[in-house]
């Protein structure tokens, strides 16, 4: 089943949609169509909507039982620990969106493509030496929320040999919900927090050119990129492996791919959840479990 909502779109598009779907209210269409028809409809919507806005909700075989797509919308679909969420528009994000957008150079696009290719490599290609990174933030928005903790561990020959951990100074209070989730208090931040620029510089030095391992890598890397650009620091472009993506390719009988769910699945016990250094160790243990599964499967094929 699909649900389509269109706003300020040409009448011709409305006519096309009524050939396949029922219009149950102005601009709202529902129906049961094949995946091929659904894809053709979405293609037609994007081609015909012009400056209009469109949203499609569709049934799919995932934990949530649905997926959604948007066109010309200020609402932004994001992936959060394997769950598809919608990020609400805010004045700050809308202002940034309307500002002149800086494009990537050809070299930048090439580096990005290479990183994405690396993320999709097989488990057996993950090296024995790498660094694990995790951030804690005040929320999900790149424009409105901030990094409050940076953690990293260094792994050599599959053994943790060093760690790095910083709380970050803020100019305002941490939301109560984040204090409750992480246990990071405003008094702790004020007492031992460091400047974000200093923490990122230390992180860059700590990881060097090591490959990186993160859980839901896009989330953390986007926050780091935004912060680095703000403070005119080098962008981290190390090869990256995402345990969330690896778990999706490796495991099929799990409820979802959140870090906590995967730790429970493998019966990995580690304290300090939702703290950067604790989640770094959790991600490390998770990766080792996933690597073992990959190795066992490889041996069975031989």
Image (spheres, grey):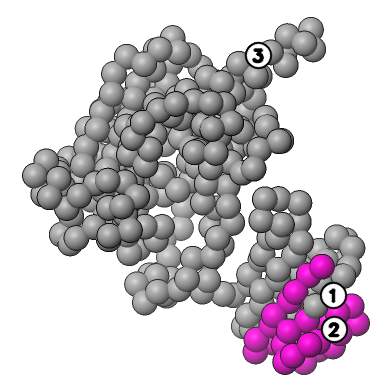
Quarter of the image for residue 89 reads: bottom left
- Name the residue nearer the viewer: 68 or 179: 179
- Residue 93 is left or right of residue 65, and the answer is left
> Label 2, on which residue?
22
Residue at 15%, 59% in the rendered image = 171
Specify start and end residues of the magenta stretch as a single range.
1-29
- Name the residue nearer the viewer: 147 or 46: 147
**Residue 99 visible in this rendered orientation of the protein:** no
Q: Secondary structure at mark 1?
A: strand
Query: Looking at the image, do the residues carrying marks 3 and 2 touch, with CB atoms under 8 Å apart?
Result: no
Q: Is residue 19 magenta?
A: yes
Disc 1 crowd rating (10 Å Cα; few below 14, some 14-19, many 20+) is: some
- Residue 149 is left or right of residue 189, and the answer is right
> Label 3, on which residue?
295
Give the position of the N terminus as an image quadrant: bottom right
**Residue 6 visible in this rendered orientation of the protein:** yes
Residue at 39%, 70% in the rendered image = 93
User: Vertical placement of 140 versus 259: above or below?
Assistant: below
Q: Position of residue 59 (x, y in %)?
A: 76, 61
Sequence-wise, the earlier of marks 3 and 2 is 2
User: Vertical placement of 247 versus 194: above or below?
Assistant: above
Structural distance between the alpha carbons of marks 3 and 2: 51 Å
Q: In the rendering, which numbered label is found on residue 31?
A: 1
Q: In the rendering, which numbered label is found on residue 140?
A: none
Sequence-wise, the earlier of marks 3 and 1 is 1
């Amino acid at each position: 089943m699909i649900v389509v909502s269109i706003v300020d779109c040409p009448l011709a598009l409305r006519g096309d949609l009524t050939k396949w779907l029922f219009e149950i209210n102005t601009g709202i269409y529902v129906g049961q169509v094949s995946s091929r028809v659904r894809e053709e409809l979405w293609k037609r919507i994007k081609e015909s909507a012009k400056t209009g806005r469109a949203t499609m909700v569709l049934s799919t075989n995932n934990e949530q039982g649905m997926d959604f797509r948007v066109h010309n919308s200020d609402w932004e679909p994001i992936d959060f620990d394997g769950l598809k969420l919608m990020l609400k528009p805010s004045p700050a994000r809308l202002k940034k969106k309307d500002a002149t957008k800086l494009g990537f150079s050809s070299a930048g696009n090439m580096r990005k493509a290479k990183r994405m290719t690396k993320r999709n490599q097989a488990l057996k290609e993950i090296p024995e030496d790498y660094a694990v990174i995790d951030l804690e933030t005040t929320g999900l928005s790149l424009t409105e929320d901030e990094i409050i903790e940076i953690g990293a561990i260094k792994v050599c020959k599959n053994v943790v040999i060093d760690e790095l951990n910083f709380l970050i100074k803020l100019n305002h209070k941490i939301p109560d919900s984040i204090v409750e989730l992480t246990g990071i208090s405003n008094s702790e931040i004020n007492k031992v927090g460091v400047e974000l620029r200093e923490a990122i510089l230390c992180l860059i030095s700590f990881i060097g050119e090591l490959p990186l391992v993160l859980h839901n890598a896009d989330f953390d890397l986007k926050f780091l990129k935004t912060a680095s650009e703000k403070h005119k620091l080098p962008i981290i472009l190390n090869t990256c492996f995402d345990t969330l993506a690896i778990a999706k390719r490796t495991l099929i009988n799990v409820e979802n791919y959140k870090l906590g769910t995967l730790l429970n699945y493998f019966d990995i016990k580690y304290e300090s959840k939702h703290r950067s250094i604790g989640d770094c160790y959790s991600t490390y243990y998770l990766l080792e479990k996933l690597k073992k599964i990959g190795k066992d499967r490889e041996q069975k094929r031989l």
